[in-house]
Image (spheres, rainbow, N blue to C red):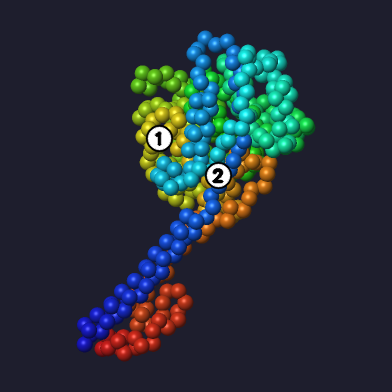
């Protein structure tokens, strides 16, 4: 009698567990369908390119090919967790809308590129005001004296993004002017974009410059390394490198330092370094466990490291919360459109933190007529079964 009663209870509990599982499975599938059906339009950035064709000792590369590579690399880098999610979509899209080819080098002023002359020559402020262009990519050789990432616009709406800051009240909004060297490769241009991101997020999310962030600031909690005050030359595997006094907190690192490295520019060096990092499941609360990583995560090359680093940055509907409890903004929107309010992305429930499964009542709780959640009666018809099981 007792064994039969226990068998009935076990069957009953199996049915309860199955119903709960099917409910959660249906919910997950439904959320995935909502996500799949959600319109996902990349953030479009209209770009003017200017090629200053100067006298160079190095072979001049095809600027259109270099530009296409930079565009493709950055768009790929904007795929949140794209390294392990083949369905991750690109947050950004660069549209080359205007191209110029100038024989000779950039105009100069006191040993630097004269940005005011460049802006005037190509009527940039008017085109920005008209909405026909959003940013400028300038290609030159070593003699171009360009900043990696400069910005022009109204004085109260521009800040240092790792280059010149040009006050232009005739520009109704800020315009970024990237400076690239055509004697090098596309990966160096992506490196420049990395420094632009390093300057942008602390300013717009934390209200601080890159070098002023402290524990509790979003960028500090993302980087975890900071930039060193001193470095010492060392030799590793026959290579002359710099060993530096970075924080090494095991977060995501920055352009020059991986989450675990103390060697400057070691993202493309197989130095044998490794360490723990929570970057692949990052949030500023550091509530997720760290895993051991080394440079094989990005194939031990510079572009791979930058791509991996960018792909861990929150995009739309990341489900990540700031330390103040607010939703984390889309860093790619801030990167390209920081002077405009971020739109409502209509984030589906699939992007929100996964709710905890409903607890399954234990044998004792079933027979006591209550469950873990609300202490209500589970099923009054169990009374006879439970009575038989106890006698």
Mark 2 or mark 1, which is nearer to you?
2
Identify the residue under disc 2. 42
Q: Nearer the viewer, residue 92 or 324?
A: 92
Q: Say above or below: 234 vs 85.
A: above
> Residue at left 29%, top 80%?
9
**3D distance between C-alphas at marks 2 and 1:** 24 Å
Image quarter of residue 113: top right
**Which image quadrant for residue 82?**
top left
- Give residue 236's position: percent from left, percent from top: 38, 22
Residue picked out by circle 1 = 298
Tell me the quadrant of the picture where the C terminus can be found.
Answer: bottom left
Which percent across, then down, holds residue 306? 47, 33
Classify 10 Å Cα crowding around label 1: few (below 14), some (14-19), many (20 and above).
some
Residue 58 shown left or right of residue 359 in the figure: right
Quarter of the image with the N terminus in it: bottom left
- Give the secondary structure at mark 2: loop
| Residue 148 in view here | yes
User: Secondary structure beneath disc 1?
Assistant: helix
Q: Residue at x 42, y 61 (%)?
A: 29
């Amino acid at each position: 009698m007792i064994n039969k009663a226990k068998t009935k209870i076990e069957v009953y509990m199996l049915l309860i567990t199955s119903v709960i599982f099917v409910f959660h499975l249906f919910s997950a599938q439904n959320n995935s369908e909502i996500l799949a059906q959600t319109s996902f339009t990349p953030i479009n950035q209209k770009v003017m390119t200017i090629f200053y064709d100067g006298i160079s000792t190095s072979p001049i590369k095809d600027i259109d090919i270099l530009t296409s590579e930079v565009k493709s690399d950055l768009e790929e880098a904007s795929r949140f967790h794209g390294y392990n999610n083949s369905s991750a979509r690109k947050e950004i899209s660069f549209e080359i809308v205007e191209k110029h080819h100038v024989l000779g080098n950039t105009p100069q002023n006191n040993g630097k590129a004269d940005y005011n002359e460049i802006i005037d020559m190509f009527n940039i402020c008017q085109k920005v005001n008209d909405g026909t262009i959003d940013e400028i990519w300038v290609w030159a050789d070593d003699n171009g004296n360009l900043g990696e990432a400069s910005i022009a616009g109204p004085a109260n709406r521009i800040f240092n993004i790792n280059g010149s800051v040009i006050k232009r009240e005739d520009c109704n909004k800020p315009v970024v002017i990237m400076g690239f060297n055509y004697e090098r490769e596309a990966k160096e241009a992506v490196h420049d974009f990395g420094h632009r991101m390093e300057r942008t997020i602390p300013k717009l999310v934390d209200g601080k410059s890159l070098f002023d962030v402290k524990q509790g600031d979003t960028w500090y909690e993302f980087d975890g390394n900071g930039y060193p005050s001193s470095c010492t030359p060392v030799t590793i595997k026959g290579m002359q490198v710099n060993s530096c006094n970075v924080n090494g907190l095991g977060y995501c690192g920055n352009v020059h330092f991986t989450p675990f490295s103390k060697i400057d520019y070691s993202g493309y060096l197989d130095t044998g370094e490794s360490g723990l990092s929570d970057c692949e499941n990052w949030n500023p609360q550091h509530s997720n466990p760290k895993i051991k990583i080394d440079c094989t995560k990005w194939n031990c090359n510079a572009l791979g490291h930058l791509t991996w680093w960018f792909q861990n940055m929150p995009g739309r509907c990341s489900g990540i919360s700031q330390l103040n409890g607010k939703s984390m903004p889309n860093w790619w929107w801030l990167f390209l459109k920081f002077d405009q309010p971020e739109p409502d992305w209509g984030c589906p429930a699939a992007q929100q933190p996964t709710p905890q499964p409903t607890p399954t009542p234990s044998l004792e709780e079933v027979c006591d007529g209550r469950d873990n959640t609300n202490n209500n009666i589970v099923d009054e018809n169990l009374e006879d079964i439970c009575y038989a099981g106890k006698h």
